[in-house]
């Protein structure tokens, strides 16, 4: 592990320097530094809980997908009609999204950003002391974008906790639609990293 002398930001930066494919439970995973928290839930496991968050998770992931695709027309064809209008509209839209994000964060404090890695099968995140016990049932909440009010919520159990507090969770299958969108989220991020494109954070 790293010695305590390094600043957390340096540690985080070091973790993300390598552009190796990010894998977790043998599948492509999404990796970032995002506001995230583990919320323990009482036993026994209630399958209805997974269903109750499915619609919200779907909306969160669809919104993130829309924002990611929205950023694709950074360089419109100069000769295309309305190219300048589109660019101006996009700039206004981005300003509006930044404002909405700032208002949301101000009105609803979020957990502090930590290094996270997750896919539909499970997640790994930097936990805060006291760490959750092994086998603890709960929900992993992660805020994917500033301007999306709801967090993504994935249910599971704590699979392992390393001495330095890296918590590994095994998720209950979130359903085909959610799994598909999570896979696309991870793929878009991986594609951007490979292209060396620094996506503006919305």
Image (cartoon, rainbow, N blue to C red):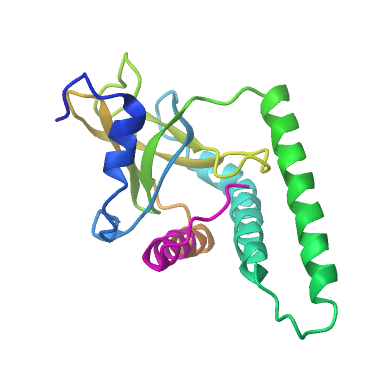
Q: Residue furthest bottom?
A: 79
Q: Position of residue 8 (x, y in %)?
A: 33, 26
Q: Which residue lies at the image location 61% right of the left edge and 54% below the top edge?
A: 64
187 shown above or below 60: below
Q: Position of residue 29 (x, y in %)?
A: 35, 55
Q: Residue furthest top?
A: 130
Is 191 one of the magenta-colored residues?
Answer: yes
Judged left or right of residue 196, residue 89 is right
Judged left or right of residue 52, residue 113 is left
90 shown above or below 81: above
- Count the marks: how many? 0
Judged left or right of residue 158, residue 201 is right
Picture quadrant where residue 32 is located = top left
Q: Which residue lies at the image location 49% right of the left edge and 25% below the top edge?
A: 112
Residue 170 or residue 184, whichever sits in front: 184
Magenta span: 185-202
Q: Position of residue 73 (x, y in %)?
A: 66, 70
Q: Position of residue 89 (x, y in %)?
A: 82, 61
Where's the N terminus, which quadrant?
Answer: top left
**Magenta stretch secondary structure, dominant:** helix
23 shown above or below 116: below
Residue 74 or residue 134, whichever sits in front: 74
Is 193 one of the magenta-colored residues?
Answer: yes
Residue 44 or residue 21, whichever sits in front: 21
103 shown above or below 57: above
């Amino acid at each position: 592990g790293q010695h305590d002398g390094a600043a957390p930001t340096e540690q985080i930066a070091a973790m993300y320097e390598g552009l190796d494919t990010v894998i977790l439970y043998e599948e492509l995973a999404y990796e970032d530094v995002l506001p995230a928290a583990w919320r323990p839930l009482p036993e026994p496991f209630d399958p209805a809980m997974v269903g109750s968050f499915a619609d919200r998770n779907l909306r969160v992931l669809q919104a993130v997908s829309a924002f990611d695709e929205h950023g694709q027309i950074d360089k419109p064809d100069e000769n295309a009609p309305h190219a300048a209008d589109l660019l101006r509209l996009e700039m206004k839209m981005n300003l509006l999204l930044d404002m909405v994000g700032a208002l949301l964060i101000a009105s609803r404090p979020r957990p502090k950003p930590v290094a996270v890695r997750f896919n539909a099968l499970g997640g790994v995140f930097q936990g805060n002391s006291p760490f959750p016990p092994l086998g603890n049932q709960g929900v992993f909440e992660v805020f994917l974008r500033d301007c999306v009010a709801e967090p993504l919520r994935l249910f599971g159990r704590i699979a392992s906790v390393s001495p330095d507090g890296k918590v590994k969770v095994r998720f209950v299958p979130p359903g085909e639609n959610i799994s598909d969108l999570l896979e696309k989220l991870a793929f878009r991020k991986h594609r951007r990293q490979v292209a060396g494109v620094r996506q503006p954070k919305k």
